[in-house]
Image (cartoon, helix red, strand yellow):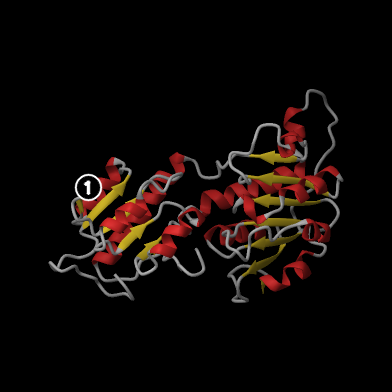
Amino acid sequence: MIGGRQVRDADGDLVTSRIHLMPDGEPELVAGLQAQGAEIVGADEQPTAVVVTGMFRSFNLAEVLEANPQISWIQLPSAGIEKYGEILRRFPDRLWTSAKGSYAKPVGEHGLLLTLAALRGLKVRARATSWGTEGGISLNGLRCVVVGAGGVAAEMVRLYKAFDTHVTVVRRTQEPLQGADRTVSQDQLDEVLDGADVLALAAAVTPDTENMIGARQLGLLADGAVVANVGRGRLIDHDALVDALRAGRLRGAGLDVTEPEPLPDGHPLWELETCLITPHTADTKAMVVPLLRDRVLENHRRLRDGEPPVGVVDTTAGY
């Protein structure tokens, strides 16, 4: 479907009627698609759509698309799609949808967890073997900056506001994000970081956002500020983060994502008592599988019925 219209192939079949799953699909997803009228087919059986279900590999997606010009819709399994960048550029005229927004609640919840853990010094306190470890501070009333405006960022704004915080959102445009006290474009990043207590990263990686947080930006934060990253590791300069934590300018950091992944053994971020790392576990398989299933089934139904799908990828912007 392009532009809200059903697209049919030369035989008159809807583009969503013959779906190739990569690498496969869990039984409930397969049953759900079949109940909606889809046929599950192999890559050599003239598929008209591809659903990628594997999270950490692109498999042979490019080869499948090259061999099947009739494929009009590709559903990706993740919200961040930077690893598909080259394939997107090769096939920009296909309809691409991602899982952006699907995992907002579990990842946003994890972002709040990392924020609170950094503020309260949880890594140290949880390992204490005697009474009297240094206490932390409360999130209530703090100045928070959230970078990003997708589903995860919106969920973090909602959760932060429950603590009577002042939340500024930084995004590509100045279009207000619901719930935020203020929304600014990325060219105002340094301005809003000045004196902020919490910096939360929940943006996609693009040429404009890669390493957007460096030594200067970290230096603008309030003394004792914290950083939480549930976006992508490449949003922040890790060397600058290590320096800021070692110098005590930051109270702490909570990272679910790093660059590279996995983060090598012995990296300073593992050793710092003020840095808590949860190695890309904000959304576990148990959380992701039903949420991805819901997204795939919703988009297949929408395409079948001639409605616009959700999570459409802007192949130019890269998310």
| Residue at image coords 25%, 58% | 68
Residue at the extreme left: 11
13 w.r.t. 128: above or below: below
Q: Quadrant of the N terminus?
A: bottom left
Query: Where does residue 268 sit, x and y in percent of width and height?
Result: 75, 37
State which quadrant residue 299 falls in: bottom left
Query: Where does residue 88 sit, x and y in percent of width and height?
Result: 42, 62
Q: Can residue 182 be seen here?
A: no
| Residue at image coords 36%, 54% | 62
Q: Can residue 34 be seen here?
A: yes
Q: Which amino acid type corresponds to the residue marked 1 in the rendered image?
A: Gly
Residue at the extreme top: 129
Compare residues 284 and 11 and report the one nearer the observer: 11
Compare residues 276 and 242 and report the one nearer the observer: 242
User: Left of 260 or right of it: where is 227?
Assistant: right
| Residue at image coords 58%, 49% | 109
235 w.r.t. 4: above or below: above
User: Left of 74 or right of it: where is 239?
Assistant: right
Query: Where does residue 155 sit, x and y in percent of width and height?
Result: 57, 58
Compare residues 10 and 203 and report the one nearer the observer: 10
State which quadrant residue 212 falls in: bottom right
- Determine which residue is flagged by label 1: 42
115 w.r.t. 128: above or below: below
